[in-house]
Image (cartoon, rainbow, N blue to C red):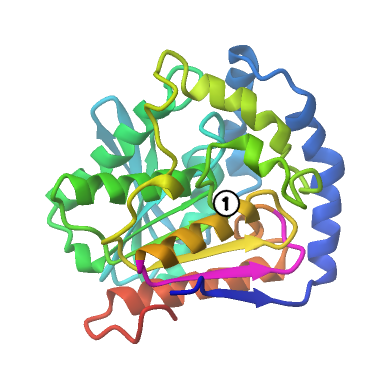
Amino acid sequence: MEPVIDFRPGVSREARRFALFMRTAVRPMFAYGPMRPSMLRLAMLLDLGAPMVMRPPRGTEIGRVRLGDFHGEWVRPAGGSGARVILYLHGGGFFCCGLRTHRGLVARIAERSDAVAFSVAYRQLPTAPLAMSMADALAAYRWILDQGCDPERLVIAGDSAGAYLAFTTVIAARDAGLPVPAGIVGLSPLTDLDHEVRASYEYTRRDAYIPAHRLGALKRLLLAGMEPDAVVSPCDRDLRGLPPVFMLAGSREALRWDAELMAGRLAEAGVPHLLQIWEEQVHVFPAFAGAVPEGRQAIEEIGSFVRARTSSHPLGVVA
């Protein structure tokens, strides 16, 4: 099987202006801030201020749930049927962002998917290493199944670092003999922790706001106290038996490398998949659907995939 990649040409003026803003106003903070625990604690404040600018659609209902040492929240769009469920794992490099920064994105995806979503506040740096984040994601998946959720009506989704957890969760569930979900959605997915390989990629240094050269320091923090080979990146795992996968990425972002690499590995494993590459879009551009029309279009694509995978009579592998 060859990788299935669909290039989406055309870029709006809004998207160009937004990319310029991210490059000049946001990238310097990530590029030059010290990658140490004190800086990571400050990054956690981003989630607290998010409701002022990242609001969900009107009428969205939120219900918080405690899951042992971490928590999550149900995100119910106005008028949603609840016929299907999305388990969502937010991005943020395993050290920033959270339920509030992603509430608008999760609500819009759930709305266009005619679904309810459960968004997970897994533990992160500086207090929790990667292994703990992975364990929380799997625990949330087990909890969803324990609530009686039909896995054929369930899709697991995530962006960036959250997409890393989406893949590792499904792989761990398969290995544990649990039923796998109906599909996986990865937005600008992080699938490879090998920052040295990605460094040679054409767009690594040109990404609008993700300074890929900092990933080495981040990796050291994530794997602190662990054996070097204790955590294997999703792209290097056995991917056979995974459900159909839908991914998207911007054409000029560093993690396009990861998305294309994962598409190739999925093809080798015989896993049905589709990767959309959107021209000149920034990292996780659907999160900025309020400012970028391509973000709204991408959310429609995600919703189509979720509905197709979880319908009683699926319309196909990918929509």
Q: Is residue 28 above or below residue 227?
A: below
Give the number of marks.
1
At 42% from the left and 13% from the top, the residue drawn is 225
Q: Is residue 259 above or below residue 36?
A: below
Q: Quick check: is 288 in the magenta stretch?
A: no
In percent of width and height, residue 20 lies at: 86, 52
Q: Is residue 262 left or right of residue 242?
A: right
Amino acid at circle 1: Asp
At 29% from the left and 49% from the top, the residue drawn is 171
Q: Is there any visible trace of residue 251 in the rendered image? A: yes
Q: Is residue 78 left or right of residue 153?
A: right
Q: Quick check: is 272 in the magenta stretch?
A: yes
Q: Considering depth in this image, is 150 or 59 the residue closer to the camera?
A: 150
In percent of width and height, residue 55 lies at: 58, 51
Dividing the picture into quadrants, the one containing residue 242 is bottom left
Q: Considering depth in this image, is 75 or 28 the residue closer to the camera?
A: 28
- Magenta stretch, residue numbers: 270-282
Q: Is there any visible trace of residue 77 in the rendered image? A: no
At 49% from the left and 57% from the top, the residue drawn is 262
In percent of width and height, residue 83 lies at: 25, 71
Q: In what element is the residue under mark 1?
A: helix
Quadrant in the picture for the C terminus: bottom left
* Residue with the mark numbered 1: 258
Q: Is residue 152 left or right of residue 294?
A: left
